[in-house]
Amino acid sequence: MSLWSRWAQQPQRVWVRRALFQMHLWTGLALGLYILMLSVTGSALVYRRELVAWLRTPLPPLDASARKLTPDELRAAAGRVYPDHRIGEVSESITRQTAVAQIALDRNGQTRERLFNLYTGADLGDAFTRGERAIIWTVRLHDDLLCDSDGRFWNGIASAWVTLLCLTGAVVWWPGVNRWRRSLIVSSRAGGRRMIWDLHSALGAWLFVFVLMWGVSGFYMGVPAPFTALVELVSDPNPERFGERPGDVALLWLSRLHFGRWRNEWLKAVWAVVGLVPAMMFVTGAIMWWNRVVRKRAARNVAESVLT
């Protein structure tokens, strides 16, 4: 039987598949917590704008017919609320929908910014709330791993390994021509261990394109040089002849697909839910490894200790 026939019929007996299985297993375990973190934070950040709007200090609506308080009147209003603070700079922030004044308050050398109603002088809350700080921290964690300089680069390198994990998983998934349909469903009749296996296999198969896209796009945003070099290599040397280059458009869409902050709420919800799949893949994979390796090894050690 040829290598291709064995791969089609009984891939578990092909040594390449066994080698890729070991690569997939140990890469997944090594990157597990990283994948879990990126998956959960990425799904949450699909709703970044909505979260910021919910967590920030509520702003009064713009009222073009109302009289705005002068800076001196706003300082006086702030002084009544914070008599033990030195009232600093007053700045207005007016948009199409809201109008607010931001005032700097200083006490014992510590400065904080508070928002005040531009029309009534009422104290509204912090200019930058704890919730907004939490969102910014989550963004830094997801994008730069909380590092100031090389975090995005190392994030891109790790995403390249996630891409490799995804590709090896696709090879390992193939069960043979007679059983591939079974690997696309989760059987409700199976026991706990089999259901974990089914879930890992089915999620990986159905949502392979999503996970691969996140791996490749994360690699691109952390290490863009190879991608831009490829675009330069395959693109027309005179871009003015045809307008925007297809390679640049592809890279732009790669970034858009990564974040999934669509205007369509249903599409955004799909991205948020599917974004949790890498986390589920790690959890199910870790459980399978625990059941197959760690528990069996522990049981064998117990049996040997009893016999001795």
Image (cartoon, rainbow, N blue to C red):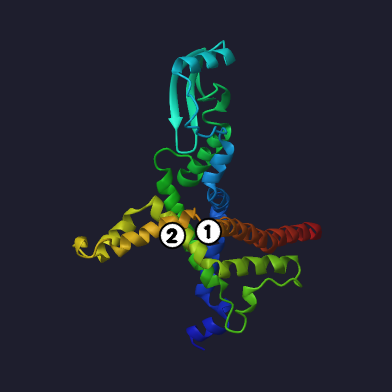
* Picture residue at 56% right of the left edge, 43% below the top: 51
Residue located farthest toward the right when viewing the structure as drawn: 306
Q: Quadrant of the C terminus?
A: bottom right
Q: Local crowd at mark 2 within 10 Å, few (<14), some, or many (≥20)? A: many
Residue 57 image position (x, y, % from top left)? 56, 32
Q: Which residue is mark 1?
A: 27
Q: Is residue 160 visible?
A: no
Q: Find out whether the residues at labels 2 and 1 contact each other: C-beta distance under 8 Å.
A: no
* Picture residue at 51% right of the left edge, 86% below the top: 5
Q: Which residue is mark 2?
A: 216
12 relative position to 93: left or right: right
Front residue of this view, candidates 66 and 220:
66
Front residue of this view, candidates 144 and 66:
66
Up-down: is 132 above or below 205?
Answer: above
Front residue of this view, candidates 104 and 17:
104
Q: Which numbered disc, 2 or 1, marks the residue closer to the eye?
A: 2
User: Toward which corner of the image does residue 52 lie, by quadrant?
Assistant: top right
* Picture residue at 43% right of the left edge, 48% below the top: 154
Residue 241 image position (x, y, % from top left)? 19, 64
Nearest to N terminus: mark 2 or mark 1: 1
Residue located farthest toward the top when viewing the structure as drawn: 84
Could you say which disc has been placed on residue 236 in the image?
A: none
Residue located farthest toward the front when viewing the structure as drawn: 65
Identify the element where label 2 is drawn.
helix
Identify the element where label 1 is drawn.
helix
Q: Local crowd at mark 1 within 10 Å, few (<14), some, or many (≥20)? A: some
Mark 1 is on which residue type? Thr
Mark 2 is on which residue type? Val
- C-alpha gap between disc 2 and disc 1: 16 Å
Front residue of this view, candidates 35 and 120:
120
Residue 133 image position (x, y, % from top left)? 53, 34
